[in-house]
Amino acid sequence: MVNNLPTPAQPLKIGTRGSPLALAQAFETRRRLGAAFDLPDEAFEIVVIKTTGDDRSMIDADRPLKEIGNKGLFTKEIEEAMLDGSIDIAVHSMKDMPVEQPDGLVLDCYLPREDTRDAFVSLKFNSIADLPQGAVVGTSSLRRKAQLLNRRPDLTIVEFRGNVQTRLKKLGDGVAEATFLAQAGLNRLGMDDVPATAIPTTDMLNAVAQGAIGIERREEDARTTDMLAAIHDVETGQRLAAERAFLGALDGSCETPIAGLATLEGGTLTLKGEILRTDGSEALADTVSGLIADGPALGRQLAETLLARAGDGFFDWR
């Protein structure tokens, strides 16, 4: 029983970035909370917060993310609003989230995970293999860049960011022959008309926590704690516990090419991880399996195994 449920007069304030995908994720959170507690949409207020990562002067300049900041680019201002009481909860794309949260904040509610795969997007070609020698590909993701160069060192990579429409326009203008998006985002936005092909994870392993939505709260807020517990997806939480432990042990950031995916079958969790040199010249991958409850330990174990194989300087910028 949750006491003091929100009302239209005193709504629960949901913080989010203002992109179409971020808003779709906030609306999904509102829908699930409303259904769980039989509340109208008016019992919730969507609060759009501009983050450093949303600063168009930097994004449009196509500067490498490592020159702008790290994963906190898309979370810092939202978390500050939660700490000062301007919002009650925050909805995040989990692949953007740092492993550690600020003191006083907790991230332990996840919605059911979407497709984890990357999508290959091109107006001319259907796959990476179809790209001609020397083709130009646009991406701002160090992971995707390193994975691509590891498999196709002949390709030229250029910085490439913006929303879906911006990226398609750049493709049409000939800035690049192809780019990548998260398949989950296309699915959540219903963008079936985008010329995209999902890439098997055997060909391009996804970012840690890709396809997952996380909802952050204040640690001492009993009402939101109880409300979020009602919509938490246990399986997604189990998978992300392993993946994020793997990332945390590697000290992953936007400056380190790291990929990871946990899957569940029966009582067994299997975690595959990959680390790459920043120029794609070397990739190391391995897999561990064990009990679901041991997911975080498995993540740390896999990280230690790959780090031992990599040696010093593996992630040094090249």
Image (cartoon, grey):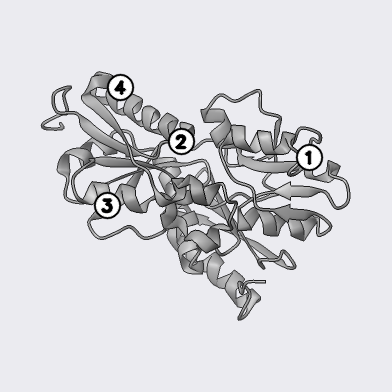
SS class, disc 1? loop
Type of the residue with mark 1: Ser
Counting residues from the start of the chain, the first of labels 1 and 3 encountered is 3
Counting residues from the start of the chain, the first of labels 3 and 4 encountered is 4
Residue 227 in view in this figure: yes
Cβ atoms under marks 4 and 2 closer than 8 Å: no
For disc 4, the marked residue is: 35
Q: Quadrant of residue 215?
A: top left
Q: Quadrant of residue 183?
A: top right
For disc 1, the marked residue is: 127
Please name which of the two marks, 2 or 1, marks the residue nearer to the observer. 2
Counting residues from the start of the chain, the first of labels 4 and 2 encountered is 2
Please name which of the two marks, 4 or 2, marks the residue nearer to the observer. 2
Identify which residue, 22 or 61, lies in the foreground.
Answer: 61
Counting residues from the start of the chain, the first of labels 2 and 3 encountered is 2
Please name which of the two marks, 3 or 4, marks the residue nearer to the observer. 3
Type of the residue with mark 3: Glu
Please name which of the two marks, 4 or 1, marks the residue nearer to the observer. 1
For disc 3, the marked residue is: 80
Pinpoint residue 279: horizontal percent, then vertical percent: 70, 66
Label 4, label 1: how far apart the Cα atoms are: 40 Å
Relative to residue 147, is residue 127 depicted above or below?
above
User: Residue most toward the left?
Assistant: 4
